[in-house]
Image: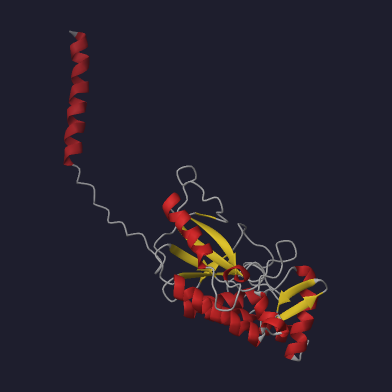
Amino acid sequence: MRRAVLALPLILVLVTLSAAVRALPAAPTLSLPKPQTIANAPYPGAYVGRDYRVVDPTIYPAVGGQTTFTWADLEPQQGSYRWDLIDHFLQGEILQAGKRAAFAITTYNGRVQGGLQVPQWVYDPALGGDPQAIITCGSVQIPRYWNSHYQAMYDSFIIALGARYNGDPRVSWVQIGSGLYGETQPVDDQDDACVRAALAADTGSNDTLVLSSQWVATVNTITDFYVSAFPSTTLFLQFAPTFLTPCERKEVTDYAASRGVGLFHAGLLANFNNAVFPPGGGAGCG
């Protein structure tokens, strides 16, 4: 009898709790915002860099793969293009692995990765080229990125590249090829003095700020080439390194952003070599 008496309060408590729960107002329905997307960038996510082997996404869950092509490989003769090299990569990503694809262009790969990647016909007089399109630093040949002939020939190539791949549904994005490895410095650090001397001779000034401004203008001109050729494809400026002053990074990224170009930092770090400026410009960059 005592056991039944003890159970009665417990039953009353449970009934009371049940009634209280039924009396609570219904939980409000949450209306979550839809994920934001970037115009012309429908496939955000992780991409495999230098995806030469076309990594299986069932093993490594990447959205797509990326690789780099050189101007020399893609246009071995003026006006004759090897689009099959890019097409082979794109089809490999789409058909074999079900991934999206992205690619970069480079015209100079430094002392240890193949050096000059400008087609010979651009600078060889025997092939109708202009030798002033190239700087010779000892045994190394380097693009004279600001040279009018170099820029005219490079622009023609980019126009043809865009005519082929702008808006191609297989291509998620394209990395702009500005300088060394496509990034925003012209050469390896050990060749800075040689390239600076060539730029000073062509500019008529040895003032660091004047030369830096000329380099920024060169990078921005190349950015314009790509923006004009790829109006319907996401572009990225590879902005991590600088040439003569840290402020170059701020100037080229401000300009790229104003043209709708994304920013690509080929690294994973908090701050390196003034990679981050505080609010207000910082480091005297205005």
Q: Is residue 115 visible?
A: yes
Given residues 50 and 22, the one toward you in this image is 50
Percent of width and height locating residue 274: 67, 68
Q: What quarter of the picture does the C terminus occupy? A: bottom right
Q: Nearer the viewer, residue 195 or 279?
A: 195
In front: 277, or 243? 243
Q: Residue 183 location, x and y as percent?
A: 63, 69
Q: Residue furthest front?
A: 126
Q: Quadrant of the N terminus?
A: top left
Q: Residue at x 67, y 63 (%)?
A: 272
Residue reaching furthest top?
Answer: 1
Q: Where is 268 relative to 80, above or below?
A: above
Residue 45 visible in image = no
- Farthest residue, direction right: 138
Residue closest to the eye, 48 or 270: 48
Q: How is the image coloured?
A: secondary structure
Residue drawn at x 50%, y 77% as measured from the top left: 160
Q: Position of residue 34 (x, y in %)?
A: 32, 59
Q: Residue at x 65, y 77 (%)?
A: 248
Q: Which quadrant holds residue 81?
A: bottom right
